[in-house]
Amino acid sequence: MRVLITGSSGQIGTNVALALLDRGDEVCGIDIRPNPWTKRIPTVLCDLNRPTDDDFSQIGKFDVVLHLAAHAKVFELVETPRRAMENVGMAFGVLEFCRRHRTPLIFGSSREVYGDIHRHVTDESQADFVVAESPYSASKIAGEAFIYSYAQCYKLP
């Protein structure tokens, strides 16, 4: 299987990519920075907020895209909320790539979309994404909403 992993230089992206490589899958990473832990993951350096056609022409087609790229430090996004909007922009760019190539997408969301889990117990099927407690959680909720809309409007697999 040919897998594109956005955010491949992060901790989760690195571990998933290495596991897929060990399993025999072909993996390509895309990230804003080189991977600090391994050189085994072929990576296209690209700012997903400002991708160019050249960035995407380098990587070709995939069987699936695993979208993990995000600014993830909640406290930093509280201080600099513009970075939360960049998360939404990254999700949009990845969705457009998937739409153009008819590629299935797996999205790495966050427990933050459920709010303060210590305040009240909520079954996942009962979760309501109307209230975001931080710019980071809002960016992840927006990403999920965009993905749902692309599945509905464009029949994204």
Image (cartoon, rainbow, N blue to C red):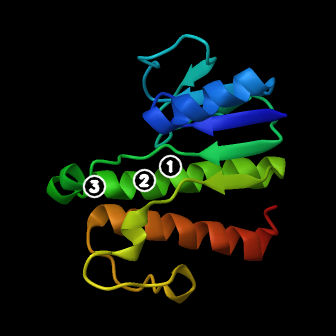
Q: Which residue is mark 2?
A: 87
Q: Which residue is mark 3?
A: 82
Q: Which mark is residue 29?
A: none
User: Can residue 32 be seen by looking at this rendering?
Assistant: yes
In which quadrant is the N terminus drawn? top right
Q: Residues within 10 Å of mark 1 (few under 14, many from 20)?
A: many
Q: Residues within 10 Å of mark 3 (few under 14, many from 20)?
A: few
Q: Which residue is mark 1?
A: 90
Residue 139 location (% of width, % of height): 40, 63
Residue flagged by tag 2: what amino acid is it? Asn
| Circle 3: element type | helix
Furthest-top residue in this view: 39
Q: Residues within 10 Å of mark 2 (few under 14, many from 20)?
A: many
Q: What's the CA distance linking mark 3 and mark 1? A: 13 Å
> Counting residues from the N terminus, which is met first, the one under dot 3 or under dot 2?
3
Cβ–Cβ under 8 Å for marks 1 and 2: yes
